[in-house]
Image (cartoon, rainbow, N blue to C red):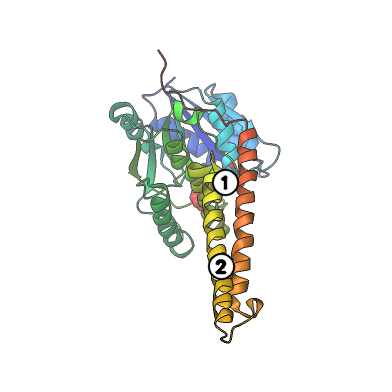
Amino acid sequence: MDLSIVIPLYNERESLPELTAWIARALKSFSYEIWFVDDGSTDGSWDAIRDLAVKADNIHGIRFRRNYGKSAALYEGFAAAKGEIVVTLDADLQDSPEEIPEMVRMIREEGYDLVSGWKQHRKDNVLTKNLPSKLYNWTARKVTGIKLHDMNCGIKAYRAEVVKNIEVYGEMHRYIPYLAKNAGFGKVGEKPVHHQKRKYGVSKFGLDRFVNGLLDLMSLWFLSRFGGRPMHFFGTSGILMFLVGFVMTVWIIAEKLILQSQGLKFRAVTDQPLFYLALVALVLGVILFLAGFLGEMISRSASERNRYQVKERL
Ligand code: UDP
Ligand code: MG
């Protein structure tokens, strides 16, 4: 089979029949399957999926017992997908299936591991979505080193190998290209895509996504650099901190002893701000070091500590 279309959805009942028809029109020349992943909808989306699935045997559904989030839905969809190329699509008719053939061509002919959409003319609220999203994507580009304008675009196409070898969890769906890059799939392409206004239903993501998104970005950055060697991060900063404290302590004591030995006026060690700074630095240094040891113990017992991406064997 050529394509697996994975569609995560949460309360998108009205859009589903239209979306399915649109996909059928756009993908006439491909063999494909659709995986609707119902992320705990309460609006009857599942009934809509069932109606569609009875009519066509390439339409499948997975239904969560409750709402787990878009990442979880993608994870299950990826696990179920059997196509040679896996495409994700939002269910709300904002992404156009017409873009899929060109994305597929880029993967097949230009050798991309994944191709991400770019909502060049985004049809959402300018203040709450478009502008913050620009800033957020700029940060993501700097941190991840992946030159995408729209990291979190819902429409993306992947070589099947990619989605089978990454694990989307928490709210990490925002950073799938980064997850892929960290797994060794570094050839990431981009295609400007048409974007439509939401026709039915409401957006599922509020402003809190920027705070959470930023925190997730920091976690991923940390994990990709130091996940397998936490001591190198905590140990280095711990030693530096400890050294700073140590130098300050030596300075305070030496200053006092020298002044004292020359019979000059001197300040008591505990009488000066530097003493407290030194104390804080020493304690922080030890704490950072301990965090390093704990990190090492955790990563040592992690089940994926020796999971590598082997590309080929002979
Ligand atoms: N979605 C989901 N689970 C959630 C939230 C959203 O499966 O908990 C789906 C949603 O139904 C849609 C896609 O993720 O198909 C993108 O969500 P939305 O359109 O609300 O995001 P926006 O386009 O507003 O950024
Ligand atoms: Mg949307």
In the rendered image, which quarter contains the C terminus?
top left
Residue in the image at 56% along x and 67% along y: 250
Looking at the picture, does residue 199 appear above or below residue 56? Answer: below
> Is there a contact, CB below 8 Å, between mark 1 and mark 2?
no
Which residue of the protein is positioned furthest toward the right in this rendering? Answer: 65
Looking at the picture, does residue 196 appear above or below residue 241? Answer: above
Along the line of sight, which residue is nearer the eye, 129 or 202?
A: 129
- Please tell me whether mark 1 sits on a helix, a strand or a loop: loop
Residue 171 marker: 1
In the rendered image, which quarter contains the N terminus?
top left
* Kind of residue indicated by mark 1: Glu
> What x and y, as percent, mark residue 306?
55, 28
> What x and y, as percent, mark residue 195?
40, 48
> What x and y, as percent, mark residue 308?
49, 27
Q: Is residue 67 left or right of residue 265?
A: right
Q: Quadrant of residue 274?
A: bottom right
> What x and y, as percent, mark residue 265?
58, 87
* Kind of residue indicated by mark 2: Val
Mark 1 to mark 2: distance in Å? Answer: 48 Å
Q: Earlier in the sequence, mark 1 or mark 2?
A: 1
Q: Quadrant of residue 25?
A: top left
Along the line of sight, which residue is nearer the eye, 164 or 281?
A: 281
Residue in the image at 62% along x and 44% along y: 295
Q: Is residue 188 left or right of residue 176?
A: left
Residue 14 in sight in this render:
no
Residue in the image at 60% along x and 54% along y: 288
Along the line of sight, which residue is nearer the eye, 210 or 271?
A: 271
Residue 194 marker: none
Looking at the picture, does residue 197 appear above or below residue 21? Answer: below
Q: Which residue is mark 2?
A: 250
Looking at the picture, does residue 89 appear above or below residue 124? Answer: above
Classify mark 2: residues with Cα within 10 Å, few (<14), some (14-19) or many (20+).
Answer: few
